[in-house]
Amino acid sequence: MAISRFKKILIANRGEIAVRVIRACRELGILSVAIYPSPDRTSLHVRMADEAYCLGEDPMGYLNTEKIVESAVKSNTCAIHPGYGFLSENPEFAQVCEQAGIVFIGPKPSSIEKMGHKIVARKLMHKSGVPIVPGSTEPLQSAEQIQKLAREIGFPLLLKPAEGGGGKGMVLVREESELQQAFQSSRRISKSAFGSDLVYAEKYVEQPRHVEVQILADSFGKTIHLFERECSVQRRHQKIIEETPSVFLNEQQREDICLKAVKAAVAIDYIGAGTVEFIIDKKHNFYFMEMNTRLQVEHPITEWVTGVDIVKEQIRIAQGEKLLLDQNSLSQKGHSLECRIYAEDAENNFMPSPGRIHHLEMAQGPFIRVDSAIYEGYTVPQFYDPLIAKLSVWSYNRSAAISKMISSLNEFKIFGIKTTERFLIDLLNNNDFKEGRYDTHLVENHLKKNGFLKKMTEDEITCALIASGICAYESRHRSLQDKFFNTDASSWKGVSRRESLRNSYDI
């Protein structure tokens, strides 16, 4: 495969991941192109990119394949980076890019398709010698079929959509009397969320750990791993704290699970960056769960402990370059944690909290990293996932990393919206987490025992109100947002690194 150096990359995404890719492009000397629907025109990725194209009024324009490819063609873009979410695991989008002569920075459409269908993926993994959770390898057509399966592997069972993810449509069945209702419920949710009512069943793993392995593969047949990440701290099946290395694995288990991840990637002829996810039972047996055929939200912690820039490697691989990284020379150094900060009200059942940020102070210091696209004066929109920042830290051991993370979260000051830093501090101080004896039920158990985040004291509320008032006053007089963003495209002058390019486009 001949090497074709990219001159320009369009980022088919928004928020912090778009900013992350833009920064990687800058370091590689590649121009970046942003896309955005009108409601998202004040996003940081739009401001940072070398060019920006409007997708129209629909807030979900990030799913409009036709307009995205049209923007890529208009801007003479060589390649498209999909980030995560949106169209990143859509084989049809990857195929459309290919047909338009644009490189999709990710795996081949066929690899995405194989891993996107959970039953097909289970069959492939089983055939390739990668352990899977005991259960069905064909879609289930009736509750009677599940009943027969239950006699073979026992209860509890977990019903799962064949073409889903993110926990949607998963239904736990603990006894036979629940089968019929659970089957109908899982099919209904699956049809609504994923357009298919195909479901399968597998043995429910009690007290599970969720561990994933980062892999990189080039187009010359070389596949390596960048070790594992522990992702068991979850709420509603969504990760909120990740760490690496996992405290649950010994060195032999770590080597075994990582080699199985490489085997999984090779089995589907994978190219690019991807993540193989495993579930581990309390006896340390691990099973393939799924593969994310894209960049993961939590990739920064792997970058901390390995020193590898995963986004740059993605781009180099997509350009047709060979992986220069050698498996034997890679190792995990120290310990890293990531906390996902959401615009949510932890005192009110984690309700989303969109709105204007009146004042913002982010954590700073040695071995502290903030991946974010928010700024003072920015209005967090209601249309998208409420993740507003990823805070990651590195230290020489786990205990020191936890202390650094708590200190860093305490440094975060966001006024104008509700955010989850205090809840994350509560979790980090949980004894089960500190001692590393937690599983995917940690948050659920923590909430049962402690309730939702404790209400602020009267003194804390008074201080917060005074600080917020001062910040709002200063913000009005500085008028930061008006300075950088208004309806006149000429106002972008002086902001862009290449203003002459910007003024030529509809922004």
Image (cartoon, rainbow, N blue to C red):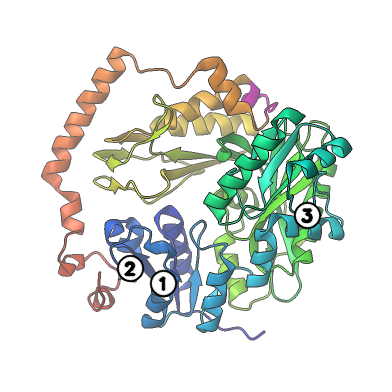
Type of the residue with mark 2: Leu
- At mark 1, the secondary structure is helix
CA separation in Å, label 1 and label 3: 36 Å
Tag 3 residue: 138
Displayed quadrant of residue 173: top right
* Residue toward you, 427 or 66: 66
Tag 2 residue: 55
The reply to whether the magenta stretch includes residue 434 is: yes
* Magenta segment: 432-438
Mark 2 or mark 1: name the one nearer the start of the chain.
2
Residue 336's spot in the image, x, y percent?
A: 60, 41
In contact (CB < 8 Å): disc 2 and disc 1: yes
Above or below, 398 relative to 499: above
Type of the residue with mark 1: Ile
Residue at the spot x=63%, y=69% of the render? 107
Tag 1 residue: 68
